Image (cartoon, rainbow, N blue to C red):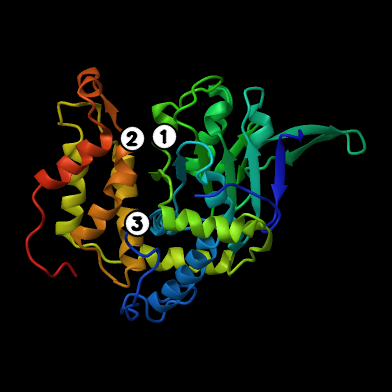
Amino acid sequence: MTSRIQSATPGEHQGEQATGQAPYPTGAGSVSGRQNGQAGRASLDELHETARRIAANVERVLVGKPDVIRIALVTLLAEGHLLVEDVPGVGKTSLAKALARSIDCTVSRIQFTPDLLPSDVTGVSIYNRQSGGFEFRPGPVFANIVVGDEINRASPKTQSALLECMEEHQVTVDTSTYHLEEPFMVIATQNPIEMEGTYALPEAQRDRFTARVSIGYPDQQAELAMVDEHAGHNPLADLEPVSDRESVQRLIEAVRSVHMSPEIRRYAVDLVAATRQVPEIRLGASPRATLQLVRAARAQAALSGREFVVPDDLHTVAIPVLAHRMVLTTEAHAARRSATDVVRAILHRVPVPQGSNHR
């Protein structure tokens, strides 16, 4: 493997620095009848406690950004992938590394560059003279959490090496298919401002990311706390895992069982369908977006201590899940309309299901 690729276990690297809702719930619900008697599935109480520990761990590195941390946890529990898009120095890599190190699982990091090859990501078959045959050497994508730094600096050919991995959790090399271990999550970063030496992510690639977040600059109080605590010491150096792979997999199983009523499912479909009918949008959200919106809403509900999804859960995750998948028209760009503005307008326009009981 080339020197551009660094495989790591939790607790080995350094990074950068980075309102609203707490990244973990203030109270936990009881276990529903759907969860009782099913071994290997966590209760909402366990999910609440584990999420609280992970969020607190990440907050030691990313100060004053609880909403961003919460979306990262939602993406993890929704079995998705996270795209962190922002200007340099606000903590994109730090968020990815802190989340990865908070879980005791296999972690790898790929520094994407223009000369990176697809085999540098997925692995390569090497001839073994002793055995007289070829043997497969796995690439850094064979890990539970893969941190892809500056993904838009790789060529489209190399970016496409992640398509099968992210969607099907498998890698095909020389007609042989290798399955990736669960859970599997890609956390990629990119700088949307500097375009020199970059390749824009194609729609097929962006559509495979469950959510996109922008960290933004910290407020003055958070930045002062960062200066006081981090100026002379890198908090990533002392970050220890607070959960493990098996626990996270149990939490994912619990999120799958969160109930979504037929009315809420219909509401989710209506929200996504509305993105295909707005005049400002040239390409609306895909059916894959509908599935990932539903999964993210279930994770959001579980983190809020509920066993069922309500419309507010869909509202909370709609912008991170839908905005990056849409392609605006030239007229919308000229009018300075953003995909985020369009999603907000859709949330106000599509009727919310009536009734308070969505169980």
Q: Residue under label 1, please give it.
A: 206
* Of callouts 1 and 2, the N-terminal one: 1
Give, as a three-letter code, the residue at label 2.
Answer: Arg
Q: Residue under label 2, please give it.
A: 325
Q: In the rendering, at what x and y percent does residue 3 appear?
A: 76, 35
Give, as a three-letter code, the residue at label 3.
Answer: Thr
State the SS at label 2.
helix
Is residue 44 in view? Answer: yes
State the SS at label 3.
loop
Above-or-below relation of 181 to 47: above
* Of callouts 3 and 2, the N-terminal one: 3
Estimate the spatial distance between the alpha carbons at disc 3 and disc 2, rounded to whole Å. 24 Å
Estimate the spatial distance between the alpha carbons at disc 1 and disc 3, rounded to whole Å. 25 Å
In percent of the image, x 23 and y 53: which residue is there? 315
Give, as a three-letter code, the residue at label 1.
Answer: Arg
| Circle on res. 19 | 3
In percent of the image, x 56 and y 55: which residue is there? 227
Q: Please tell me which residue lies in front, 316 or 67.
A: 67
- Between marks 3 and 2 in the image, the one whose residue lies nearer the viewer: 3
Q: In the rendering, at what x and y percent does residue 243 appear?
A: 57, 69
State the quadrant of the N terminus.
top right
State the SS at label 1.
helix
* Of callouts 1 and 3, the N-terminal one: 3
In percent of the image, x 32 and y 62: which residue is there? 21
